[in-house]
């Protein structure tokens, strides 16, 4: 295949960037990007001076079909910090190529954010990760999904980017301290991304555990990779909504995932709000 035949969508990022810049008209220049996972979308209600842009209005933007994902960017201020929140994300299992899955992340990086906070719902593999636990992501395993960096290099970063420190240690430290200060128990561990949409088999979970994974989910890791490639610092927090397959007696369901995520909302929101402030000061 010749390079011009590869539809990598880099031009789409520029077009979407132009569209959003026109809409914002200089009213906010986000410093921190936040991606809200399943059941956490209400967090965006806390943003002041809000400007909402539905994904469906943005040219060439991948839209999500998942229940519980709203599908819009919310720009504004949180504790005075200029932010952009993604209410809902795009998943590989929806059928988009990985480059399209990370297009919204690249777009936020293009808007000039210098920090990205990723959140998700995940299954707990580690012994201490129970439904309702929060976990700071300290590292990740992406070997079971295609790299979003395959194809022509996106010139925001190098062809062969270093991934030895995907989750910025200084951000991890701030999150740990913030949780302590807010008296919110938080664990830490390694997140493994699968393609989904099916949940895992017990044998797969035993394999992932042996490989060093503490939590499993269907998003986040490729987003972190794309942001790191673009030179943006990344933090990640998982809301553990269930014990991973085979580690509890009940079968997994999306409604269980959502109802646990809903219950953890209030702790999660307090923590996230404080983190945004402390990371920017
Ligand atoms: N597996 C994959 N993704 C998930 C899970 C799980 O157990 N829980 C929430 N998202």
Image (spheres, rainbow, N blue to C red):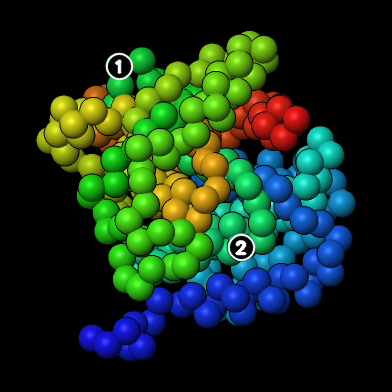
User: Does residue 219 show up?
Assistant: no
Q: Quadrant of residue 150?
A: bottom left
Q: Is residue 214 left or right of residue 259?
A: left
| Label of residue 266 in the image | none
Find disc 1 in the rendering and name its residue. 127
In the picture of the structure, the residue carrying the numbered disc 2 is 110
Q: Is residue 134 left or right of residue 270?
A: left
Secondary structure at numbered mark 1 = loop
Image quarter (top left, top right, bottom left or bottom right) of the C terminus: top right
Query: How far is the residue under mark 1 from the one under mark 2?
Result: 39 Å
Answer with mark 1 or mark 2, whichever residue precedes in sequence.
Answer: 2
Instruction: Describe the element under mark 2 as helix, strand or loop.
Output: helix
Q: Mark 2 Cα within 10 Å, few/some/many (few <14, many 20+)?
A: some
- Residue 264 lies, with reference to residue 113, above or below; the image says above
**Looking at the image, which residue is at 77% across and 56% down?**
29
Respond yes or no on whether mark 2 lies under 8 Å from ligand 1.
Answer: no
Q: Residue at x 16, y 38 (%)?
A: 204
Residue 116 picture location, percent across and down:
58, 45
Q: Quadrant of residue 262?
A: top right
- Res 118 seen here: yes
**x, y percentage for residue 140?**
34, 38
């Amino acid at each position: 295949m010749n390079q011009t035949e590869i539809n990598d969508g880099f031009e789409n990022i520029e077009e979407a960037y132009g569209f959003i810049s026109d809409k914002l008209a200089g009213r906010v220049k986000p410093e921190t990007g936040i991606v809200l996972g399943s059941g956490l979308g209400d967090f965006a209600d806390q943003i002041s001076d809000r400007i909402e842009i539905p994904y469906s209005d943005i040219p060439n933007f991948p839209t999500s079909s998942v229940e519980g994902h709203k599908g819009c960017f919310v720009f504004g201020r949180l504790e005075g910090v200029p932010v952009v929140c993604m209410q809902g994300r795009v998943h590989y299992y929806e059928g988009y190529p990985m480059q399209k899955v990370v297009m919204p992340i690249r777009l936020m990086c293009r808007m000039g954010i210098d920090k990205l906070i990723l959140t998700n719902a995940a299954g707990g593999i580690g012994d201490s990760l129970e439904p309702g636990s929060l976990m700071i992501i300290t590292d990740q395993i992406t070997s079971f999904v295609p790299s979003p960096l395959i194809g022509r290099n996106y010139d925001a970063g190098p062809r062969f980017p270093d991934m030895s420190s995907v989750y910025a240690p200084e951000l991890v430290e701030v999150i740990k301290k913030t949780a302590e200060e807010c008296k919110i128990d938080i664990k830490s561990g390694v997140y493994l991304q699968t393609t989904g949409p099916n949940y895992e088999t017990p044998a797969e979970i035993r394999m992932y555990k042996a490989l060093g994974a503490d939590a499993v989910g269907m998003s986040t890791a490729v987003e972190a990779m794309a942001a790191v490639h673009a030179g943006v610092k990344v933090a990640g927090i998982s809301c553990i909504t269930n014990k991973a397959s085979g580690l509890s007696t009940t079968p997994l369901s999306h409604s269980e995932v959502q109802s646990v995520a809903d219950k953890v909302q209030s702790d999660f929101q307090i923590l996230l709000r404080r983190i945004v402030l402390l990371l920017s000061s």
